[in-house]
Image (cartoon, helix red, strand yellow):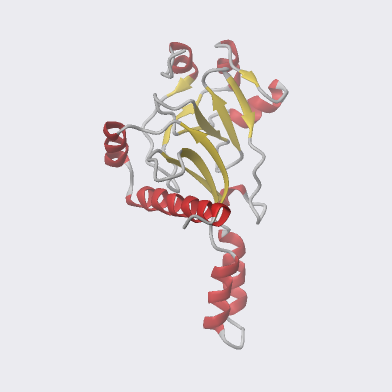
């Protein structure tokens, strides 16, 4: 099966032009789950249709590239993530929770350039709300500067999930770079660095 946007997928997704938000490459939105269901999409984890209808109505379509095996759906308003498998025509909710409990703290990025650890979709917990609360408390600390520094150390952004996928070729990478924002490119570089740090930690091959 070719990894291309099928006619069925195009019919069930209302593709619109949207600027990337929080470095996520939003390429369209879901009309409603019943349209996807009518085109043959199913739940991979047994989620009932009513739940999927509520979760995916006007959900953001993220990182749907012709060469990838998967892409992400995100409940509108910065909600939970669902992983869409193009080959099996299934969707499943990703079990990833932000430390603060606020899903808006999460963001995602497609790392399509192989920098030593393959390519993947990565979900990042910015820990923004926890860091913001700690910074507010730091104002009344004995040493505010030190307290703020500790807040950033404790609640710095971290990759909470990676989902392996195909890499982009050089032409596709150039096309993605041309469409990416500066924040998006910085986040991709950061994710790649974090992946190499984790590889170094696990293998000792630094």
Q: Residue at point 54% right, 76% down?
A: 148
Q: Is residue 87 above or below residue 132?
A: above
Whole-percent x, y for residue 103 in the image: 61, 47
Q: Is residue 132 left or right of residue 23?
A: right
Comparing 138 with 146, the one in front is: 146
Q: Which residue occupies the extreme bottom position in the image? A: 142
Comparing 201 with 83, the one in front is: 201
Comparing 205 with 33, the one in front is: 205
Q: Residue at point 49% right, 56% down?
A: 197
Comparing 134 with 110, the one in front is: 110
Q: Is residue 20 left or right of residue 173?
A: right
Q: How many marks?
A: 0
Q: Is residue 149 above or below residue 205?
A: below
The quarter of the displayed image where residue 163 is located: top right
Q: Residue at point 41% right, 18% down?
A: 4
Q: Which residue occupies the extreme front position in the image? A: 205
Q: Is residue 71 left or right of residue 180?
A: right
Whole-percent x, y for residue 27 in the image: 41, 32
Whole-percent x, y for residue 133 in the image: 61, 68
Q: Is residue 93 above or below residue 13?
A: below
Q: Is residue 88 above or below residue 61?
A: above
Whole-percent x, y for residue 49 in the image: 69, 21
């Amino acid at each position: 099966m070719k990894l291309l946007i099928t006619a069925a997928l195009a019919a069930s997704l209302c593709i619109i032009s949207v600027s990337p938000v929080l470095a996520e490459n939003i390429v369209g939105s879901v009309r409603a789950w019943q349209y996807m269901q009518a085109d043959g999409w199913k739940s991979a984890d047994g989620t009932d249709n009513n739940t999927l209808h509520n979760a995916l109505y006007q959900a953001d379509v993220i990182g749907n590239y012709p060469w990838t095996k998967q892409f992400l759906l995100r409940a509108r308003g910065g909600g939970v993530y669902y992983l869409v498998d193009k080959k099996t025509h299934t969707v499943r909710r990703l079990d990833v929770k932000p430390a603060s409990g606020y899903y808006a703290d999460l963001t995602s990025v497609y790392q399509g350039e192989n920098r030593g650890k393959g390519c993947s979709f990565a979900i990042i917990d910015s820990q923004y709300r926890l860091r913001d609360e700690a910074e507010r408390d730091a104002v009344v600390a004995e040493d505010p500067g030190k307290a703020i520094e500790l807040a950033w150390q404790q609640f710095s952004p971290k990759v909470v999930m990676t989902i392996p996928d195909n890499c982009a070729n050089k032409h596709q990478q150039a096309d993605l770079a041309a469409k990416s924002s500066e924040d998006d490119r910085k986040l991709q570089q950061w994710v790649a660095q974090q992946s190499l740090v984790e590889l170094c930690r696990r293998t000792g091959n630094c």
